[in-house]
Image (spheres, helix red, strand yellow):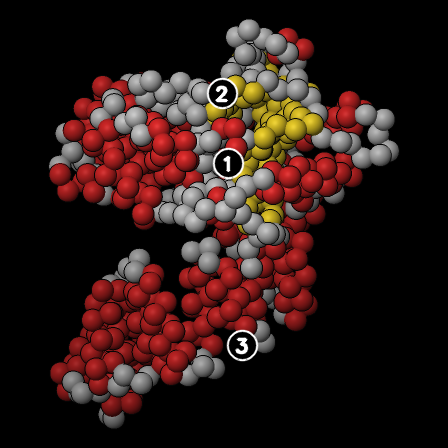
């Protein structure tokens, strides 16, 4: 038989799901035809299909040494590098394929898929612009548009793709996700249900979300179970099932839910990790410690378990226990970026600023725009007494603004506007408990993003706040490299908006907003006893970390008044003092420089 016949047989094995058989054939060909690039390229394809991307990369290197001008080989190399988490190398390889052949759609599509996964959506659009007639490329463009410009802009692209090919499940799925993001769960439900029933696994979890928002809780729980049957290690589904139980007042069912999953997966790392996260979020620290001890016996001292053991003690505010774990780690783990955040918090809690300082510098350098790390930088500066640096980052007078808003002309006053706004918002607070993974305690949060609401009074609210934001922005002076002043936007956009309702005992634990440049709180309704409260009940507070740091209490409190808006940098630690009774109803939103 000829070489091409042998290669064709091996390729058929690969396409038929028999990569091991292909490798057997190709092993012989490697010895007989060591100078043939196609042999090495096909061998790499079989190795990747067998789950060995490192071997695939090695063989692709040999193919390129023989024929460096083959765009298909560079594209295959990019896929193998992506499999190994080497995304920059993968993007370089895809670009080399396109440099060799600018009309080579597979490389552009693979690059676009990776860029979307990295949230580098503007680059996705640039890479794929020459390939708009390709349905796969257009689908990735729609996903990028959805992320950059919102679902209202993207849904038309998905609809056009569906009309061109009614059998394309990804296009139908994209439409459903847009509807879900826009708060139209009722409209999204039929499409998601049909996709899920057909076996399209990505639809299972969004179907759960739609059903939960429509208060069809038992059906929602079945949908999340279906998602876990399709993928028992689906992190979102694992957490979503627990979240649904918690937010519908069935917290006592969470432990049996996870114990069954642990047993079914033989204690799989992802299941245990999410289980621990949920126990920590529920503040059931003794149960979390017991689970971590069980998991350590099974998995050993892995980085993900160490990180969660640190989280338990940090969230429980047990400074000495957190320090004990941190100080017992091998030296090589102290530079592990996956542990860096919790190590820093453990050191700061104990006033160990010499140990936290270098790690914070590394974190800020590695993630320059990350709000959490700039907040930690401020804690460090305050802790070591570098007040010049601290005030450069945290200038409460210059960087916070509270202002009364003027209602639209059809309302007699702000009280009438707020009454109309409150009536609409209260209808959106569906659940009986807060989300597990938010700063909220003893309250509820709207499940859908208010940016996409078509309610007139909510649209009027967003129009009202725009003038206040412009006043805030115009008082700032640019300063390169500063987390607030280094990116003062000419054009801006909302990147998230929600409403919070605090009940008796309700509060926000101190936190930052990682997605924003500027954050806010607008007071719609405030309990009367909050006004002038000597203990500052229900007041907003700034500059107190969520973990205890010696000498770092709140620096400023802001009394909430209905009709007032407070704006502040997203990297400022902020929270609220608990209210004892009544209801505190707010809208919050984040602002960022406009993308694209």
Mark 3 is surrounded, within 10 Å at the Cα level, by few (under 14), some (14 to 19) or many (20 or more) other residues, namely: some
Viewer-nearest of labels 3 and 2?
Answer: 2
Quadrant where the C terminus sits is bottom right
Mark 2 is surrounded, within 10 Å at the Cα level, by few (under 14), some (14 to 19) or many (20 or more) other residues, namely: few
Q: For mark 2, what is the residue?
A: 556
In percent of the image, x 28 and y 33: which residue is there? 344
* Res 183 seen here: no
Question: Which secondary structure lies at badge 3?
Answer: helix
Mark 1 is surrounded, within 10 Å at the Cα level, by few (under 14), some (14 to 19) or many (20 or more) other residues, namely: many
Asked whether 525 or 53 is in front, the reply is 525
How far, Cα to Cα, is label 3 from label 2?
Answer: 53 Å
Tell me where residue 400 appears, x and y as whole percent: 54, 31
Q: For mark 3, what is the residue?
A: 130
- Reading the chain from its start, which is encountered first: label 3 or label 1? 3
Tell me where residue 242 appears, x and y as whole percent: 46, 31
Q: Is residue 149 above or below residue 406?
A: below
In percent of the image, x 61 and y 9: which residue is there? 532
Quadrant where the N terminus sits is bottom left
Tell me where residue 482 appears, x and y as whole percent: 43, 44
Q: Is residue 518 above or below residue 366?
A: above
**Are dots 3 and 1 in contact, CB under 8 Å?**
no
Q: For mark 1, what is the residue?
A: 569
**Are dots 3 and 2 in contact, CB under 8 Å?**
no
């Amino acid at each position: 038989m000829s070489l091409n016949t042998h290669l064709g047989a091996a390729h058929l094995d690969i396409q038929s799901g028999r990569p091991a058989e292909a490798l057997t054939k190709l092993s012989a060909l490697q010895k007989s035809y060591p100078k043939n690039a196609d042999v090495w390229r096909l061998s790499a394809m079989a190795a990747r299909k067998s789950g060995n991307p490192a071997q695939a990369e090695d063989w692709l290197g040999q193919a390129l040494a023989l024929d460096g001008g083959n765009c298909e080989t560079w594209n295959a190399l990019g896929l193998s590098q992506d499999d190994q988490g080497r995304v920059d190398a993968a993007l370089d390889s895809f670009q080399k394929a396109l440099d060799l052949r600018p009309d080579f759609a597979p490389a552009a599509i693979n690059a676009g898929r990776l860029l979307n996964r990295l949230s580098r959506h503007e680059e996705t659009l640039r890479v794929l612009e020459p390939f708009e007639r390709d349905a796969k490329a257009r689908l990735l463009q729609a996903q990028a548009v959805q992320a950059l410009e919102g679902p209202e802009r993207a849904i038309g692209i998905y609809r056009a793709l569906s009309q061109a090919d009614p059998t394309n499940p990804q296009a139908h799925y994209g439409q459903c996700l847009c509807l879900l993001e826009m708060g139209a769960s009722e409209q999204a439900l039929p499409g998601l249900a049909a996709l899920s029933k057909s076996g399209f696994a990505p639809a299972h979890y969004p179907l759960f979300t739609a059903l939960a928002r429509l208060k069809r809780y038992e059906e929602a729980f079945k949908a999340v179970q279906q998602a876990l049957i399709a993928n028992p290690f689906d992190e979102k589904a694992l957490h979503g099932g627990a979240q649904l139980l918690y937010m519908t007042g069935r917290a006592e069912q969470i432990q049996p839910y996870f114990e069954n999953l642990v047993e079914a997966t033989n204690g799989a790392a992802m299941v245990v990790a999410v289980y621990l996260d949920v126990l920590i979020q529920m503040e059931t620290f003794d149960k979390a410690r017991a689970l971590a001890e069980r998991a350590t016996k099974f998995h050993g001292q892995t980085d993900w378990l160490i990180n969660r053991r640190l989280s338990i003690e940090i969230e429980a505010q047990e400074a000495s226990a957190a320090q004990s774990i941190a100080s017992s780690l091998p030296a090589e783990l102290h530079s592990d970026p996956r542990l860096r955040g919790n190590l820093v918090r453990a050191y700061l809690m104990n006033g160990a600023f010499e140990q936290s300082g270098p790690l914070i510098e590394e974190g800020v350098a590695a993630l320059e725009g990350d709000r959490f790390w700039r907040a930690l930088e401020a804690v460090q500066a305050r802790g070591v007494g570098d007040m010049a640096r601290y005030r450069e980052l945290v200038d409460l007078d210059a960087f916070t603004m509270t202002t009364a808003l003027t209602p639209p002309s059809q309302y007699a006053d702000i009280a009438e506007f707020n009454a109309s706004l409150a009536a609409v918002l209260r209808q959106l607070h569906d659940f009986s408990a807060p989300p597990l993974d938010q700063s909220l305690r003893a309250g509820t949060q709207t499940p859908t993003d208010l940016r996409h609401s078509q309610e007139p009074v909510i649209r009027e609210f967003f129009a009202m706040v725009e003038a206040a934001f412009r006043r805030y922005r115009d008082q700032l002076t640019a300063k390169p490299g500063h987390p607030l002043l280094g990116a003062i936007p000419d054009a801006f956009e909302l990147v998230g908006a929600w409403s919070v309702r605090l009940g008796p005992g309700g509060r926000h634990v101190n936190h930052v907003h990682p997605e924003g440049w500027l954050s806010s709180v607008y007071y719609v309704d405030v309990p009367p006893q909050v006004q002038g409260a000597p203990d500052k009940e229900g007041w907003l507070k700034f500059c107190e970390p969520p973990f205890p740091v010696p000498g770092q209490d709140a620096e400023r409190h802001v009394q909430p008044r209905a009709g007032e808006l407070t704006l502040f940098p997203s990297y400022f630690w902020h929270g609220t003092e608990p209210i004892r009774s009544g209801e505190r109803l707010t809208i919050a939103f984040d602002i960022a420089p406009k993308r694209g």
